[in-house]
Image (tube, rainbow, N blue to C red):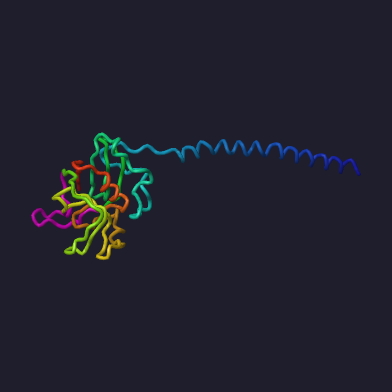
Amino acid sequence: MSKRAKYWIYGAFCLIVIVLAVTPQLRAHRQRAQQPRQAAASRPVKRPNSMGGTESHYLRKPINWRKSSEMVPYPDVNKVRDLWVKVDLKKNRTYLYDGSKLIYTMYCTGGIYKKDPKTGREKSATPTGTFHVQQERGDSFYNAKLQEGANYYTSWLNHGEYLFHSVPTTADGSYNIKEAAKLGKTQGSHGCIRLSVPDARWMEQNLPVGTKVVIVG
């Protein structure tokens, strides 16, 4: 074998050794560089603390009326000192607060807007103002006059007339898919506040009688 061939073989051997030695170090360096970005991506975002009803970073997207509005657990009302509810009819959002701290956001659908003959302005079928949760609540109802029902209702005005409840159901008890699709996007009710099925269930089972409800819009 010539000297030149030996040099080529020796050089190739040295190159292989160098590659094998350096590759793990490059991989480790790349992983260390990615860790801060991955940690930042997985770090939970702080919930807004504004009374203005800032959009929650935990909201489920796209909207799914069969699931909870947020991808985190509902608040424990036993640990909430000053629970109250704000409904923004124009934003199609229902906010749960502990004092001035926003603790949960729900997609909702309020009353249809129609022109008020007295003022000429658009007015929702849902009353605005300050109300309080009443004792009337239950798992389901059906209004034959309106040919519409719902599940998991909680009254906040006129003892069963104005409610928080699930997206609407038909006469056979199935959900009205067309109406359910409006949740969080537009208005559509006769005056009640529609919520996703799990959100309405949580309200019925957890919202104490006397809880303040402020409706704006």
In the image, residue 63 above or below residue 11 = below
Based on the picture, tell me whether residue 111 belongs to the magenta stretch: yes
Horizontal and vertical percent position of residue 30: 59, 38
> What is the span of residues highlighted in magenta in the rendered image?
109-129
Residue at 38% across, 46% down: 71
Predominant secondary structure, magenta span = loop
In this view, 53 is above or below 171: above
**Residue beneath the point at 15% across and 45% down:** 129
Q: Is residue 41 left or right of residue 124?
A: right
Q: Residue at x 37, y 37 (%)?
A: 46
Tell me where residue 196 appears, x and y as whole percent.
30, 53
- Residue 169: say if magenta: no
Can you name the residue that lies furthest to the right here? 1
Q: From this view, report whether residue 186 is shown above or below residue 52.
A: below
Q: Quadrant of the N terminus?
A: top right
Tell whether 36 sits left or right of 195: right
State the residue at coordinates (32%, 44%). 55
Q: Is residue 122 left or right of residue 95?
A: left
Nearest the viewer among 131 and 113 is 131
Q: Residue furthest left?
A: 118
Vertical arrangement, residue 16 with respect to residue 140, above or below: above
Q: Position of residue 154 (x, y in %)?
A: 22, 49
Image coordinates of residue 133 in percent, x first then y, are 19, 45
Pick the front one: 155 or 140: 140
- How many numbered marks appear? 0
Q: Which of the two residues, 174 or 92, is positioned nearer the viewer here?
A: 174
